[in-house]
Amino acid sequence: MNYFLLSSKMMRATATALALMVMGCGDAGGASETSASSSETDPTTSDDPSTSTGVDTTGVPTTSDATGETTTGTTEASTTTGAAPGDGLFVVAVGEQGSILHCSEDACESMSSPVESELDDVVVLAADRAFAVGSAGVVLAWDGAAWTAMDAPTEANLSAVAALDDQTLFVGGSDGTMLRWDGATWSEVEHPVQGASGQTVHEIAFAGPDFGLAVVSSFSELGQSSILRWDGASWTSEREGMDNMLSSLAVASPAVAAAGGHAPTPDEPLNLLTRDGQATWTRVEDIEERNFVTGASFASESFGMAVTDLSFGPRPPVLALWDGATWTTQDVQEPHTAVHLVDAELGFLVGWGDDDGAFVQRWKAGELKRLPTDSSATALWGVDGIRLP
């Protein structure tokens, strides 16, 4: 595993452990996240590309043979600027070298990109409306025919993009940068760590116009991680001064959210934080793995997924599933950098590897399948998508 592949987004992995945080308010929707459990069943490892990873009836990932189902390698798919394939999906993954991939349930193919610099995050709103962000202030917009560069007023390395509604975007990045796009103009966003040197707004997520969260952290100084909350009008600090270096985030509702990263020392285990109605965060130390949580996604308050990248010590990366009450984890063979659940039956995971470079896996009804792609990128950092009406 080439640890020096890690980009600005993956500088999160330079520390030596991990923290996965879960937020829950009371029993809202039965999805209050109050505990975590760990599965000790090791999957069967195989070099056979027909091996796929599944989930048994308890929701815990397992590994089973599915000859002809899992595919590795590349495909001769041509570069495209067209709309989504005919399977009713529009899923986009972004990564190194300006890579933009357009994925169906069966394959991914490259889209024409106007940049060669790293892209770190993407949000998809419609078949003709998507946005991606990356290094040196890059913001790209998709109009259904082509990706074009927007004139964002920043040179910051951007690592987060999220849509508040159909017209309003928030982007975040290095040195406390946060910008808002209203469909016509950009403006700087006031928030508690605005302009803070060394502080990166790693992720932003919303659950409607009146609630959102952002995670901010520094990799050069401990005790500088923060969680910011959006109330529909402004950003305020919900928690600050944490040692855990937060870098991933997902929000299902004001009652259910998850944030992940890594802990400051290799001796700290993977851990959870729960949030009560007074926005008090409490750590739950029930999971032993020390992986670095790189991404999370919720299909609903009762189903979510978190993925990990590097493992410190003998443990491999893990996949974690949320069932509305607990997280269960299972070892997996490849490091993932991001995940997006289209719904409770379909998701897409991206990552990187030494031998095959960047990869995309489809998660469908409990089965993981590696999709063929024509990309030469070494790593993918973000993925998002929707079902088309």
Image (tube, grey):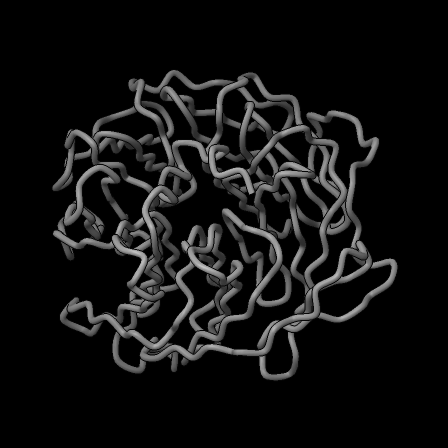
Residue at left offset 66%, top offset 73%: 62
In front of the other: 247 or 93:
247
Would you say 217 lies left or right of 248 here?
A: left
Q: How many labels does the image show?
A: 0
- Image quadrant in which you'd find residue 165: top left
In front of the other: 60 or 160:
60
Image quarter of the N terminus: top right
Furthest residue in direction right, as rendered: 68
Residue at left offset 17%, top offset 41%: 221
- Vertical comparison of 368 with 201: above or below: below
In front of the other: 90 or 367:
367
Residue 174 pos. (x, y %): 27, 30
- Vertical comparison of 299 with 310: above or below: below
Residue 308 pos. (x, y %): 47, 55
Residue 183 pos. (x, y %): 38, 29
In front of the other: 29 or 389:
29
